[in-house]
Amino acid sequence: MAEKKKIGRVKILAGFLALVIVLSGARSIYLKKNTVDYYRLKPLDINQTVLASGRVSFPQPYEITAASSGKISTVNCREGELVREGQLLLQMDDYQDRQSVQLALSDLNLMRSKQRNIAEEALPRQEEQMRQDRVKLEEAEKELDRMKALFEQGAVPAVEFEKAANNYQLLLSQYNQAVITRDSLAGGSGAAEVEAQIAYYDAQLKIAQKAVEDKKIVSPVTGTVSKLNFSPGQQAPAGATLLTVLRQQSWVVEADVDQKELSHLEPGQPALVALDAYPREKLEAKLIYISPQIDEQKGTCLMRLEIKEAKPFIRHGMAASVELLTEPNRQVLALPKQFVDFTEKEAFVWVLQDDKAVKTPITYISVGERWVIAENLPEGTVALSPEKKPGGLKVHLGREVLPDEV
């Protein structure tokens, strides 16, 4: 009998515990379902903000490529190092190119020496030879005229006259040949050939010198080495990107803004930039450019913003969110837009009254993308998050949303 009573008490206790557990679970579910975030309406200073999205576009990276193939002999920089314009960054093996320079220089000097020899020695010597031949020719011509007169008078035999004529023809031929040689040296085919050779070897020398210079990889700008693709001993093909340098200048974000917001923008306006990779970092920026042209397809306008402080984590090409700030609205009853329900024809808010959510129409002035100024709600109004549609049942307040979180 006592044993049966004991079992009965255990069953009663177990049933009671099960009921408690069920009630606790139901209460937990009820509280979870009816606990909502809230915002308490109070005067604030808020900015008219314009939001846009964009990307870090400047400074653009300078990709330094190899003008010709070659082996990397020395590397004089590291990634992340600040380098100066004109600084030697890499040296490629230029032994063969320097040999080509010496060969072309030797050939060019030989041709120039030949040209100087013509101008200073061969041409004066030939002109003197031509003068002597002309004197001989003139004397032979006088002798021919004399012998011709004597022959016609019968004073000399024909053989003497023919001898004088042959001598004149020989000296005339020598003189003409001297003239041709002089003209060739002075500016004819011989001089032209030498000049052509000089021009050819001069061009070869410049090509070889440029090849030597191309093996010296210097920085085109003052900036930071962002990427280094080769190390000493590696073979770099022609056209390969050897390294990348970012110009030393302020970071600039390019963003597209809705054309409807243009009336709120002007150069010099302050802004905040948040990079998608570092969303908690708010970087101060300044609007420096607004495009005069609208993208008709997207209905947006291009703008550029300069980031004031160069943080080490910023990288070219990073996606960014931009918030442009206008004149603040002083001490207004500002309500986050996330607490306004726009699902019906007229906007409304859920307001806490007597621990219940009451659907209340709202008249407001929109301030940017995040806030509205409530015109018909008093200070201290507790607005409930509309996510759970809290109307009807008793509401339990959950987390209070603070202005800094909006």
Image (cartoon, helix red, strand yellow):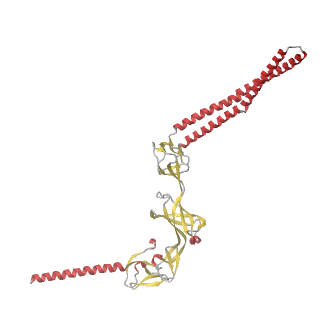
Q: Residue furthest left?
A: 1
Q: Position of residue 336 (x, y in %)?
A: 47, 76
- Quick check: 403 above or below 287? below
In this picture, is 362 found above or below 259? Answer: below
Drawn side of residue 125 relative to residue 142, left or right: left
Q: How many marks?
A: 0
- What residue do we see at 56% from left, 46% from top? 86
As drawn, which residue projects farthest toward the front? 158
Give me the residue at 68% from left, 31% from top: 115
Whether residue 399 sits left or right of residue 217 in the image: it is: left
Tell me the quarter of the image containing the N terminus. Answer: bottom left
Taking depth in this image into account, of 203 and 331 the one nearest to the observer is: 203
The image quadrant that residue 194 belongs to is top right
Which residue is at a point 73% across and 26% down the rendered structure image? Answer: 124
Q: Position of residue 55 (x, y in %)?
A: 51, 62
Q: Position of residue 356 (x, y in %)?
A: 39, 84
Figure quadrant of residue 125: top right
Residue at (21%, 82%) from the top-left corner?
A: 16
* Camera sees residue 220: yes
Name the foreground residue: 186 vs 233: 186
